[in-house]
Amino acid sequence: MKDKKLDQLKKEYQNIPIPPELDFVVKKALRDGGTTKGNRLKRINKVVASVVASVVLLMAAVNVSPAVATTAAEVPVVGSIIKVLTFRNYTFNEDKFHADINVPKIEGLDNKALENSLNEKYLKENEQLYKQFMTEMKELKQQGGGYSAVNSGYQVKTDNERILSVARYVVVTKASATETVKYDTIDKQKQVLITLPSLFKDDSYIDIISQNIKEQMQTQMQTDEGKIYWINVPGEELLVEPFETISPEQNFYINPEGKLVVAFDEYQVAPGYMGTPEFIIPTEVIADILVGDQYIK
């Protein structure tokens, strides 16, 4: 009986198909091996033996144990991976005129209508940005010169099992630089675009969030003399229109910690040197008016 089992195992071993990745492993071993022929051969033998042994063990386990075979069959297939990549790049460099425009593209959404609408929006925005740059460049040249530059790109702010938040920025430089940022936040499970109003039971979030932001601005200005926001401060004269309230569709994203982040463009609520201010809204401030806790933690 033992001899028969050994013969059977020997036949199974001899009939094992060589995995396609074995050729790659062997070639890699040759590239990474020692400086002598003997060292290379030893390394190759070890790698080959390791790969073949792994295949033998897996086949033996599946053939001998029905439980292992069942488990292997029940291993879930990994679904599509949602990713953001550069779809197109517009560049221009000539003396005092420069453009570097990167168009993002989202891939992997099952909701193709949403995926296509976002990608069409990104492409249209950046095509228009490039055309505008080229038009202004021609006008400046006709007027005797000048300087113009545009830079745009994107950044993935959050990418976890539930949320994908993507920022798209544009920096336009003429006499000075101005930066604007837009955000899209996607529920990867429900395959929908999350809007700010959709997070809340009613529009009371506008006043609640606005008040919290003004409190944060005041605190920052009190603790850091270098920070200035355009809000009314008792006893101080403000020469620009003060920030009063966010818009119903205010720029926002959800950060990796599940916190709501409200964002502003450059010059919108503060001097240009303050950049594009962002404010993390404490969850306890908005907890009572949230529709649920699946997004904001």
Image (cartoon, rainbow, N blue to C red):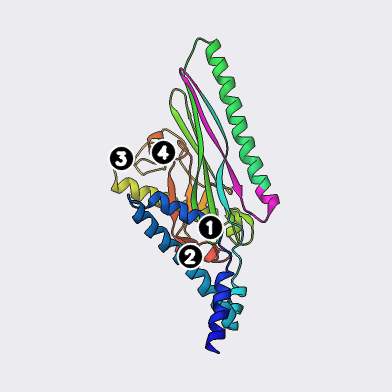
Cα separation between marks 4 and 3? 13 Å
In the image, residue 164 above or below residue 3: above
Toward the right, the furthest residue is 113
In the image, residue 9 above or below residue 295: below
Question: Nearer the viewer's eye, disc 4 or disc 1?
Answer: 1
> Nearest the camera: 284 or 41?
41
Query: Which amino acid lies under the numbered mark 2 shown in the image of this protein?
Result: Val
The N terminus sits in image quarter: bottom right
In the image, residue 142 above or below residue 75: above
Q: Secondary structure at mark 4?
A: loop
Query: Which amino acid lies under the numbered mark 3 shown in the image of this protein?
Result: Gly
Q: Earlier in the sequence, mark 1 or mark 2?
A: 1
Span colored in magenta: 93-115
Determine which residue is flagged by label 1: 21
Q: Secondary structure at mark 1?
A: helix
Q: Position of residue 77 (x, y in %)?
A: 61, 66
Q: Residues within 10 Å of mark 1 (few under 14, many from 20)?
A: few
> Nearest the camera: 120 or 77?
77
